Image (cartoon, helix red, strand yellow):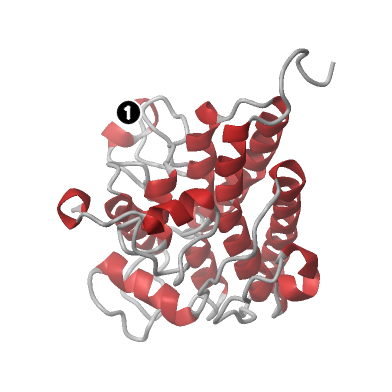
C-alpha cells in the first residue's frame, strides 16, 4: 500500500504551512541559479514564477569547477522542490527578493558587529560563496522540521519528508565544505572560516529570538554530540536531532529585522502566502517583540 487507507491526502491546515516554505525555495532557487549560470527562474522555469517580480542583485559567481557543479545541482533541485509544492498544495507568485552582494554584506556586517572592509561579496570566489550558502539552506531545514508535527495529510507528509531530505543534504554539503577549511583565513579579513560560521549562527539566533537553534562548526562540549565533542559538522540539539523553527522565527531571520511584522533583508516587500502576509497585517508591538 502506498498510503494509509481512510485518510486524507492533504488537509486544509497543510496547505498554508507547505506554501509558506515556497518563499525559501524561491530564494534558494534564484540565488543558486544566478550564481551558477548568470540567470534565474525566468529563463529556466518561467511558468513557476506566476508573474512575480524578478530578484534584484543576482549575478554569476566566480566559482571553481567543483563548487559550480555543486551549486548548479542545488539550483535544479530547488526547481523540483517548487514544482513539488505547486503540485501538492498549489502556489503563489514569486516574492520580490534581494540577492545582491550589498544585501549579503549588510548581513555579514551585522554578524561581526561592524562594517567589514571591503564589504563582504558572496560572488567573489568559491569560499565566499559557500559562506553565503551557510546562511540559507539551514533555515529551510529548520522550517521543515518545525512544520512536521502540524502536517496531517499522507501526501503532505510525503512531500515534506521528501523536501527535508535534500534540504538537510544541501546544508550538510555546505558545512562539510567549510569544515574542511575551518582554520583557513577568509581573505581579505582577519577571521577564519570557523569564526564566520559562529558569527552567522549567533546572528540567526539573535534575530530569531528563539534561544540556541543554530551552531557554528565548533561548539563547547556542553553543546556537542552527547557532550563529548567540540567538532560540530552538523547543527543538532541535545538528542542530536535537527532544530525546529516556526514561520515567525524564520521570517525574523530572512527579513534581517528580528521582527516577522517588518520586512527587509532578502524579502524587502515581505514574503508571500497567507502566513507571511497575515504577519504583515498585524500591528507591531515593539515592547513585546523586543
In this rendering, is residue 182 above or below 162? Answer: below
Left or right, 51 with respect to 228, comes to right
Instruction: Tell me what residue is drawn at x 34 percent, y 54 percent.
Output: 282
Instruction: Tell me what residue is drawn at x 43 percent, y 41 percent.
Output: 235
Instruction: Tell me what residue is drawn at x 34 percent, y 58 percent.
Output: 261
Looking at this view, name the residue that lies furthest to the left: 287
In this rendering, is residue 173 above or below 132? Answer: above
Q: Which of 236 and 83 is in front in this view?
A: 83
Q: Nearer the viewer, residue 176 or 10?
A: 10
Left or right, 24 with respect to 195, comes to right
Residue hosting label 1: 227
Left or right, 150 with respect to 1, comes to left
Looking at this view, name the residue that lies furthest to the top: 5
Quarter holding residue 202: bottom left
Instruction: Tell me what residue is drawn at x 36 percent, y 70 percent.
Output: 108
* Viewer can see residue 20: yes
Quarter holding residue 263: bottom left
Q: Which of 97 and 210 is in front in this view?
A: 97
Instruction: Provide residue 37's location: percent of width, then percent of height.
Output: 72, 76
Q: In which quarter of the image is the N terminus?
A: top right
Amino acid at each position: 500500500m502506498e498510503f494509509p487507507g481512510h485518510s486524507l491526502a492533504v488537509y486544509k491546515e497543510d496547505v498554508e504551512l507547505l506554501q509558506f516554505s515556497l518563499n525559501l525555495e524561491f530564494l534558494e532557487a534564484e540565488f543558486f541559479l544566478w550564481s551558477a549560470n548568470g540567470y534565474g527562474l525566468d529563463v529556466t522555469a518561467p511558468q513557476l514564477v506566476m508573474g512575480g517580480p524578478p530578484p534584484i542583485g543576482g549575478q554569476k559567481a566566480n566559482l571553481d569547477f567543483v563548487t559550480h557543479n555543486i551549486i548548479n545541482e542545488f539550483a535544479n533541485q530547488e526547481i523540483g522542490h517548487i514544482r513539488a509544492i505547486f503540485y501538492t498544495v498549489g502556489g503563489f507568485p514569486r516574492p520580490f527578493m534581494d540577492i545582491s552582494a550589498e544585501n549579503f554584506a549588510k548581513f555579514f556586517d551585522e554578524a561581526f558587529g561592524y562594517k567589514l572592509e571591503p564589504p563582504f561579496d558572496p560572488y567573489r570566489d568559491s569560499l565566499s560563496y559557500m559562506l553565503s550558502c551557510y546562511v540559507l539552506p539551514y533555515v529551510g531545514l529548520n522550517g521543515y522540521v518545525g512544520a512536521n508535527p502540524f502536517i496531517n495529510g499522507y501526501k503532505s507528509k510525503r512531500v515534506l519528508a521528501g523536501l527535508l531530505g535534500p534540504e538537510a543534504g544541501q546544508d550538510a554539503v555546505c558545512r562539510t565544505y567549510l569544515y574542511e577549511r575551518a582554520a583557513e583565513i577568509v581573505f581579505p579579513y582577519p577571521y577564519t572560516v570557523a569564526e564566520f560560521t559562529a558569527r552567522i549562527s549567533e546572528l540567526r539566533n539573535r534575530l530569531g529570538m528563539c534561544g540556541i537553534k543554530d551552531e557554528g562548526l565548533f561548539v563547547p562540549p556542553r553543546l556537542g554530540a552527547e557532550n563529548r565533542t567540540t567538532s560540530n559538522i552538523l547543527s543538532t540539539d541535545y538528542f542530536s536531532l535537527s532544530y525546529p523553527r516556526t514561520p515567525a522565527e524564520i521570517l525574523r531571520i530572512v527579513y534581517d529585522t528580528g521582527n516577522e511584522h517588518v520586512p527587509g533583508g532578502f524579502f524587502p516587500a515581505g514574503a508571500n502566502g497567507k502566513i507571511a502576509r497575515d504577519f504583515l497585517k498585524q500591528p507591531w508591538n515593539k515592547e513585546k517583540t523586543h
